[in-house]
Amino acid sequence: MEIVDKSIALNRKMAYVGKLGKRRELFYQNYIKEKKECIEAITQKFLKEIENESKITPCKQGCVHSTCCNEYVDANLQECEAIVYYLYQNENILAAFLKNYEIWRQKEKETFEIYKERETLRREIRAFKKPPIQKMERFKHGLQEQYYKLNLSCPFLDNNQCLIYEVRPLMCVAYYSIDPMELCSPLSTKMPKIKQAYDIPFLSDRIFYYAKLDLPLFTLMPLGVYRIISEGYSYLSTIHGIGNIKNDAMREPEIASIKI
């Protein structure tokens, strides 16, 4: 598929050229390698725990219900950028995402209201040493349920297959069902028992190719990925602590010479 949106095409051309771009590219080549190792470690730990409890899990690539793919999924900035890098190496997947994203954003108003409230709560919770229980419950469960009811399949889901399974967000890896697959069906009246991985250092990493981030930055994954694709360095320059990234990138002779 030819990318006809000029801003998307321009940001793609600019992404990994010049000294900054080369540093960015190398960072995500190494990041994806390390993330795959992290995903494998989490998966093996889960499988070992399940085996010890004489349980089985229906969770695997291509799950017939894909119920989890209707959840609100956070990803940090590095994860979103790594997904963008992966998309740029896989033309068909990039094209599928851009097509699916248009469908996903049809409910943008409802999605955005949830996103805004979640980000407000995230900032408020960070301000407390011991956040109020009501705020935590709303952040962890209330908004998740509200988003789930929108019945919005992830724009990376295609025929029950995750298009970015190799580099999927760690939040997609951190949960496993230990009940029969039938309980994962939207038609089920019972909820499956879920195991969750805690303490994933990769998620709180502040290392970035331009400068160390002030705080780990999380966002709604499809939105974060699309903004990087469509806005490029302009989006990254809105992030506190790396506000000069666009200006520094534009000074690169290789970028200045790019035309669409």
Image: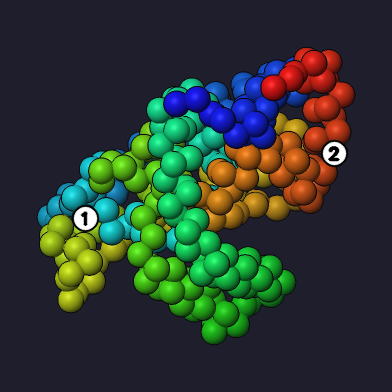
Vertical arrangement, residue 62 with respect to residue 127, above or below? above
Residue 189 spot, x, y in % from top left: 18, 76
**Residue under circle 1?**
65
Cα gap from disc 2 to disc 1, whole angstroms: 44 Å
Q: Amino acid at mark 2?
A: Asn
Q: Residues within 10 Å of mark 1 (few under 14, many from 20)?
A: some
Residue nearest the viewer, comparing 11 with 51 = 11
Label 1: element kind = loop
Residue at the (53%, 62%) spot, across then down: 108
Task: Tell me if residue 53 can be seen.
Answer: no
Vertical arrangement, residue 248 with respect to residue 199, above or below? above
Residue 221 spot, x, y in % from top left: 52, 50
Side of 57 relative to 27 (left or right)? left
Residue nearest the viewer, comparing 98 with 29 = 98
Residue at the (77%, 49%) spot, across then down: 238
Q: Residues within 10 Å of mark 2 (few under 14, many from 20)?
A: some
Side of 52 relative to 132 (left or right)? left
Label 2: element kind = loop
Residue at the (80%, 28%) spot, across then down: 249
Q: Are marks 2 and 1 in contact (CB under 8 Å)?
A: no
Q: Amino acid at mark 1?
A: His
Work out which quarter of the rendered image holds the C terminus and state it: top right
Side of 118 relative to 42 (left or right)? right
Task: Tell me if residue 88 can be seen.
Answer: yes
> Which disc, if any, is residue 199?
none
**Residue under circle 2?**
244
What kind of colouring is applied to the model shown?
A: rainbow
Q: Earlier in the sequence, mark 2 or mark 1?
A: 1
- Residue 134 found in image quarter: bottom right
- Residue 182 found in image quarter: bottom left
Name of the residue lying farthest toward the front? 4
Residue 67 spot, x, y in % from top left: 28, 59
